[in-house]
Image: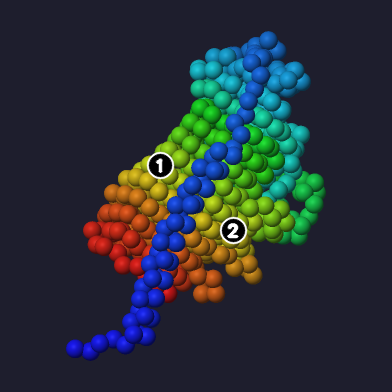
Amino acid sequence: MSVLKPKILFSILMLAIIFSCNNKRDEVNVVNHWSKMQQIIDSISVPVFSDKVFSVIDYGSVADGVFDNTKSFKDAIKACSQNGGGKVLIPKGKYFSGPIHLEDNVNLHLEDGAEILFSTNPKDYYPLVHTSYEGTELMNYSPLIYAYKKKNIAITGKGILNGQASNDNWWPWCGKDFYGWKEGMGNQKDSLNLPVLMEMGENNTPVNERVFGENHFLRPSFIQPFECVDVMIKDVKIINAPFWVMHPIKCTNVIIDGVTVESHGPNNDGCDPEYSKNVWIKNCTFNTGDDCIAIKSGRNGDGRRVAIKSENIVIQNCKMIDGHGGVVIGSEISAGVRNVFAENCTMDSPNLDRAIRIKTNSKRGGVVENIYVRNIEIGQVKECVLKVNMFYGIYGVQSGDFIPVVKNIYLENITVKNGGEFGILAKGYKESPISNINFKNVSIEKVGQPYSLENVENINFENTYINGNLMTSIKN
């Protein structure tokens, strides 16, 4: 029997200790990151309002679904804000209105049984405001509910916000037959519309010179707090949106709680935090025509101009039904995204394409890092459980000189009954591989292939089974 020399034995022991320490350090780091999630939650301020109530009825509103309440809503909101804030009450009934602009310290509260029916006439959404379309800032139609540089605002109550978008209005502007577009109609893809806006973003044209609106067919977001602090959207139901549903942009401290989104139009993302920090999305239901939650940070040159990361995003206890993805990052992502936490959610629909999705390309660039997902129950998804695509492309060629970076993705305690085509579908760049994907205590059933990988480094599987087979880590 050969005996190991003391030096060799010492080397082996040291390697074992280092390996053990590295594993423990990785585990500690993950635990520390989940405790960081609680720190984020604890740091988010909940808006607080005066007990004063300003009923829109007292300012001339009529709940017949026909009378134009735009002015009476505006008057009630102005009076509330100027008198120290409080609740602007929308009593039970149907109220027709144009855009609603919130002011400081105002809680727009819809009683159970109240419904706001928003105008479908684009001219009602003048004057144009500073807003954003698919990650590029511009002057365009006002969002249906808008707040610009406001503090301590909320939309609450058990009522309904109805954008009234359909194949007869707003939706055809996307240019797709399925949504009512017909040959000869204008649409966002026309050469003087979205392509011009994209070019302005690349050329750093001043935002006040990016004037669109009528005859440019760029749809307004439904709810958009723009550069606001301490924002809450709670309990309302939102249906039939023209475009993105909830779009907090350049905001800090946002709570979205108990909201139901049912809107199957084009680009009907449920919630799109963009350039925003400390966002808490909880207890919501998303049933959408696009991504359920899509975290963004600007498109291409305009995103690099703004250069504000979206960070510290917490998603808890949400239900995802239809959608292109459950929790999505991108594709407008040029300023980067970091520190995203999702836990205790359910996802299940034959019309849900992916559970977790990251999409970018070399025009977008940006760094996506530190994505933590745990305690997720997935019934059925079409394509895959996790998709990371660095070559996402719409609107023609999407290659450029800004190679993105994607790293540090953790999925833990995930059960999937029907995983679709792939467990993991990931495609990176040779010069910028996707790195450090971690699956722990994951079970995926009824999936076509465990994974399809291109330029991916370090996939760590711990107690992970795909189609009943224990998976082995892949080190590169």
Q: Amino acid at mark 1?
A: Cys
- Residue that badge 1 annotates: 345
The quarter in which the C terminus is drawn is bottom left
Q: Mark 2 sits on what residue?
A: 395
Regarding residue 370, the answer to whether it shows in the image is yes
Q: Position of residue 220 (x, y in %)?
A: 64, 39
Kind of element beneath mark 2: loop
Task: Tell me if residue 476 comes above or below residue 168 in the rendering.
Answer: below
Nearer to the camera, 402 or 470: 470
Question: From the viewer's perspective, is 42 left or right of 137?
Answer: left
Query: Whole-Å distance between the Cαs marked 1 and 2?
Result: 32 Å
> Where on the picture, by quarter, is residue 76?
top right
State the image quarter where residue 226 is shown. Answer: top right
| Residue 80 locus on image (x, y percent) | 71, 19
Question: Residue at horizontal 59%, vertical 68%?
Answer: 403
Which residue is found at the position 31% from the left and 49% from the top?
415
Which x, y percent locates residue 186?
64, 46
